[in-house]
Amino acid sequence: MNIEPSNFIENIIVSDLEEGRCDHVQTRHPPEPSGYLHIGHVRNIVLNYGTAEKFGGVCNLRYDDTNPVKEKQEFVDALQEDVLWLGYKWAHIYYATDYFQQNYEIALKLIKEGKAYVCDLSPEELSATRGTLTEPGTNSPYRNRSVEENLELFERMKNGEFPMGARCLRAKIDMASPNINMRDPVIYKIQYMEHQRIGRKWNIYPTYDFSHPLDDALEGVSHSICGLEFEDHRPLYNWVVENSGLKNRPRQVEYSNLLIKNAVSGKRNIKKLIEDGIVEGWDDPRLYTLRGLRRRGVLPQSLIEFVKGAGFSKSTTIAERSNLEFYIRNTLNEVSKRVMAVIDPIKLVITNYDKVEENILLEDYPQREDTTYRTYKFGKELLIERGDFEVNPPPKYHRLFVGNNVRLKGAYVVKCTGYDLNEDGSVKTVYAEYDPTTKSGEGCEVKVKGTIHWLNEKYATKCEVRHFENLLDEEDEGSTSERAVRDEYKINPNSKQVLTNCYVESDVEFNHDDRYQFMRNGYYCLDKDTTDGHLVFNRTVGLKDTKLKKI
């Protein structure tokens, strides 16, 4: 296999293949079905599915469903939908609960070999004996129980004879280990809960540190690619596999987290925002959940390219939002249909235009050589953006003001002749005259410094437009998934703006699958709140093009 590695994980895999440590590549995507995926999970998905694909191997989706307190079937279903949306496909779907019997049998093997024991310490007492980073732990008074007594007690735990928390099964390793994870870790707990998949079949549940390495080994995983937070758990991972009696020996490889500066991405944090009513749900477009990003109009390829562009390393990566927006904008620019839309309208009256209408040719995809075209109607009464007219224009302002010429996109050059004001002093109507010799595409030689978009009031559809800014105030630095949930966030009061007096071209057939560039405004998509009689658009990202910053 002649594969050029592109990151340190692929270097490890190539080395393992060349040295004969493994003869195939198999990975796994092991999410816990306790919430919806967010942007931080994309790196794990790209690494596990993408690496297996690159090496011609297999990646399975395996749910870590060992915590029925937090897990729901809706999360199971949503996880699959999100992975497929990103463009990846698993070979098989497994569940940690599929391996409960084999986990149990390996636990019995450890007990029989004197490598595991039943401990009667309460969770609080057990924690007190763990020691510190500088002091060793204290042996449990139950550490030297006989094999026979441990087997009997473990069987009674399995049969549901003891209260929750009364006993647990611990691996007998080393209470003086400098790695606290190796100080006789708990590998089984008593659990009396209704599981969404297996009901009350089991009264004892393996811990993640016990079941995960066993499930990897049982499945045939060659490389267990996981987050850096599991690096200190790797010695325990290896111990469990080495003492399991299983032939397959997966290799755990850790990578760093990818965080976005001043953004909330941790499941606990997001759940708190939802519970506090700060956001509307897991698919709120202000969130960095995959559901929220999708609803906002982000395309999956943007997220994949963002993750790959950030690279993979052993140190935590904190990216600016502008880096993500760079990839979002690049992807959208290639696929978005150009449409004229007026977000904050004022009326423009062409005083010397007497025709009823005239066909104006507009490009659908000017970014493509094979663009298609559509026609639109010009008229006497138009709508333009309020910001495209100034009573007292600032320096270098090249749009409409009295005496200035601009081109109306795809139509004519017009000269502003006057305006009317409302009682509150705001602009009500702008007046202009058009030059009939300046129609676009007919060889006009008149040069102007400004071109603005517009709509014919008679051929425009009123719609709702939603603009989004960062959920957290820009001064609230360090708001990432690494931070613990705080009692109070500094929320940006302008994180969501709903504009109800907006207009788009009436002849465009909008749909949920396509993306649109509203000329000079940004990239937009239809929101799920759209109905037959009411269009609702979400702005995905603005048009401002920023250079990619080095992460």
Image: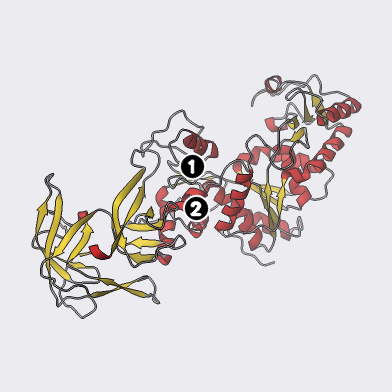
Tell me residue 15's x, y (percent): 69, 57
Q: Is residue 516 left or right of residue 8?
A: left
Tell me residue 186's x, y (percent): 74, 30
Instruction: Specify the amino acid type for callout 1.
Output: Gly
Q: Which residue is mark 1?
A: 281
Seen in the picture, residue 256 relative to 160 is either above or below; the reply is below
Q: Which residue is mark 2?
A: 310
Q: Nearer the viewer, residue 511 or 101?
A: 511
Question: Which structural element holds mark 1?
Answer: loop
Q: Is residue 380 left or right of residue 208?
A: left
Seen in the picture, residue 57 relative to 205 is either above or below; the reply is below
Q: Residue at x 33, y 41 (%)?
A: 494
Would you call the spot at circle 1 few (<14 residues within 10 Å), some (14-19), or many (20 or more)? some
Q: Is residue 118 left or right of residue 3?
A: right
Question: Which structural element holds mark 2?
Answer: helix
* Label whose residue precedes the other's in the sequence (2 or 1): 1
Q: Residue at x 22, y 59 (%)?
A: 384
Q: Nearer the viewer, residue 501 or 75?
A: 501
Closer mark to the observer between disc 2 and disc 1: 1
Would you call the spot at circle 2 few (<14 residues within 10 Å), some (14-19), or many (20 or more)? some
Tell me residue 349's x, y (percent): 14, 63
Residue 519 visible in this rendered orientation of the protein:
no
In the picture, residue 75 is in which quadrant? top right
Q: Residue furthest front?
A: 533
The CA span between labels 2 and 1 is 28 Å
Residue 58 visible in this rendered orientation of the protein:
yes
Tell me residue 426's x, y (percent): 15, 48
Q: Is residue 435 left or right of residue 135?
A: left
Instruction: Specify the amino acid type for callout 2.
Output: Ala
Dividing the image into 4 quarters, which one contains the N terminus?
Answer: bottom right
Q: Are marks 2 and 1 in contact (CB under 8 Å)?
A: no
Q: Residue at x 28, y 71 (%)?
A: 376
